Image (cartoon, helix red, strand yellow):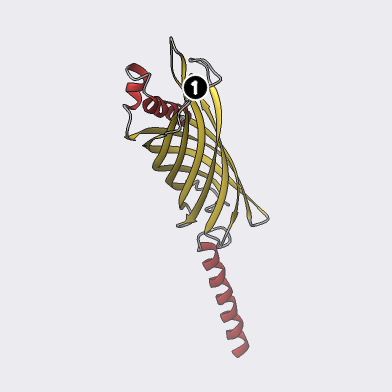
Amino acid sequence: MFMKNNIQFLVFTLLLAGSTAVAQPGYQGRKLSVQANLLFLPALTNASYSREPGSSTFNTTGEASADYVLNKRNSLGLSFRRSRTSNINSYGAEGISAAKVFTNSLELQYRIYKKKNGNIAPLGKYFQCGAGMLFSQVQEAGSVSVIPFRMYAFRMGRGRNRIIADRLILYHGWELSHVMPASGGEGLWGATRYYKDDAQTMAQYRLWRHSLLNFKIGLGFLAY
């Protein structure tokens, strides 16, 4: 009788431990993941140093991100991006007016993982939305001074994480974005109508074009 009770207790303990492990959020209990991503940014019908107005250009941006699993289907993350691009402000009798644009951004991102057998954050397909701030500078050709400005960023998209050897993360996905001025410049409407000689406004227009559609790939790891 004593042996039987011990066996029943042992079985009950194992079942309880197994159910607890399954209910625990995170892949194998690991909740924090860190990634390095590369974004491919087509800037549709937007001139740069090497392209005429009406043509499309292509750029890349680096991103470092960290995500923390909140539960089996959701995670919250923080990302940092750094980019550099160029922009033609105007064409006139004195020639081409060009500028360089530098941007750092800090953003929050929220992920909702698809309800599918075998998927558990941060593994599988997910929908992502986020918002943040772009801290930018524009420097006109031949000038040593820079003009600072800020922009709000709002993003949404889809992605998929694959986990290799229970530690590495392979990522691919896409996102749609909209950025709008937070300080300085005349905004996107001004850039298309009245302020073609304003380097700050045209830099905002350039960044808006670059942010419309992004494709992303990345590599990361499960920290703990």
Apparent side of residue 190 relative to residue 220 in the rendered image (left or right): left
User: Is residue 1 in view from this perspective?
Assistant: no
At horizontal 41% and vertical 40% (from top left) the residue drawn is 135
Q: Could you say whether the residue bearing mark 1 is in a helix, strand or loop?
A: loop
Which quadrant is home to the N terminus?
bottom right
Q: Position of residue 19 (x, y in %)?
A: 53, 66
Q: Position of residue 101 (x, y in %)?
A: 46, 32
Instruction: Name the one closer to the observer, 117 or 81.
Output: 81
Which quadrant is home to the C terminus?
bottom right
At horizontal 36% and vertical 19% (from top left) the residue drawn is 192
- Image quarter of residue 216: top right
Crowding at mark 1 (Cα within 10 Å: few <14, some 14-19, many 20+): some
Check disc 1 and report the residue beneath it.
44
Apparent side of residue 178 relative to residue 213 in the rendered image (left or right): left
- Image quarter of residue 18: bottom right
Instruction: Name the one closer to the observer, 124 or 201.
Output: 201
At horizontal 35% and vertical 25% (from top left) the residue drawn is 188
Q: Looking at the picture, does residue 187 appear above or below residue 112?
A: above
Q: Position of residue 38 (x, y in %)?
A: 58, 39
Kind of residue sitting beneath label 1: Leu
User: Is residue 90 in view from this perspective?
Assistant: yes
Q: Position of residue 173 (x, y in %)?
A: 55, 38
